[in-house]
Amino acid sequence: GSQHHRLRRLVTKTFTRGRVEHLRPRIEQIVNELLDELPQYAAADGSVDLRPHYAYPVPMRVICELVGVPEEWRPQLRTLVDSIFRTDTTPEEVTETQRARHELLNNLVDLRRREPGEDLTSALIAANHADPEALTDEELIDTIWLFVTAGHETTLSLLLNGVRNLLTHPDQLEIDRKSTRLNSSHTQK
């Protein structure tokens, strides 16, 4: 309805393709760092569990960069995200998670008001100053939480399922390799 339209309009003003493109070099750096670290996690047979060493940290680190979460806060945020996706979380843990996530994200909003950056949280705060239908603090906190949780879990699943599908369908992996080589040769020209 109109409330959803209002919230979506305010977010789409700041969460733009340009903002994501600006983050591309950092995303590539994160991906390359994690790929470079994979050999240290290899078992004797050379296999690596991608979930904890690649598929999980990629979206968490990228989203934290996107929304401007300081490095030292990220472990707590990771614990909070994990808590809401566990199937054995008790009602008491859910309550504590909601309290802690609200506190952490409220602190993030306060920090970005004092020290704005080039992140999405700072952009949403700046957009709020210019718009009479601005997000309330609660809406801002909930929007950031939605970005973190939805973006993390969907990307994690996409990475794992994509790798699984490529490994179980070698013909598709070969098509991807040929496409990569073709694109690489065009880029070099």
Image (cartoon, rainbow, N blue to C red):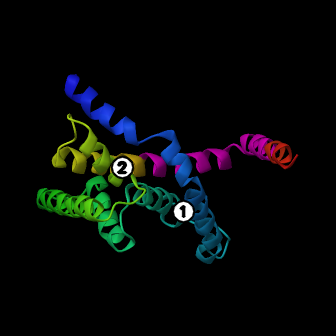
Residue 159: image x %, image y %? 54, 50
Q: What amino acid does circle 2 point to?
A: Ala
Q: For the image shown, how many numbered marks are present on the structure?
A: 2
Residue 66 vs residue 161, the one in the foreground: 66
Residue 124: image x %, image y %? 32, 47
Find disc 1 in the rendering and name its residue. 54
Query: Which is closer to the viewer, label 1 or label 2?
Result: 2
- The stretch in magenta equals 154-180
As drawn, which residue projects farthest toward the right? 189
Q: Check disc 1: other Cα within 10 Å, few if <14, some if 14-19, many if 20+.
A: many
As drawn, which residue projects farthest toward the top? 1
Find disc 2 in the rendering and name its residue. 123
Q: Is 48 situated above or below 183?
A: below
Q: Would residue 148 be seen by someone viewing this image from the given angle?
A: no
Mark found first going from the N terminus, 1 or 2: 1
Name the residue located 14 percent from the left edge and 60 percent from the top edge: 99
Distance from label 1 to label 2 (Cα)?
A: 29 Å
Name the residue located 73 percent from the left edge and 45 percent from the top edge: 173
Residue 138: image x %, image y %? 16, 48
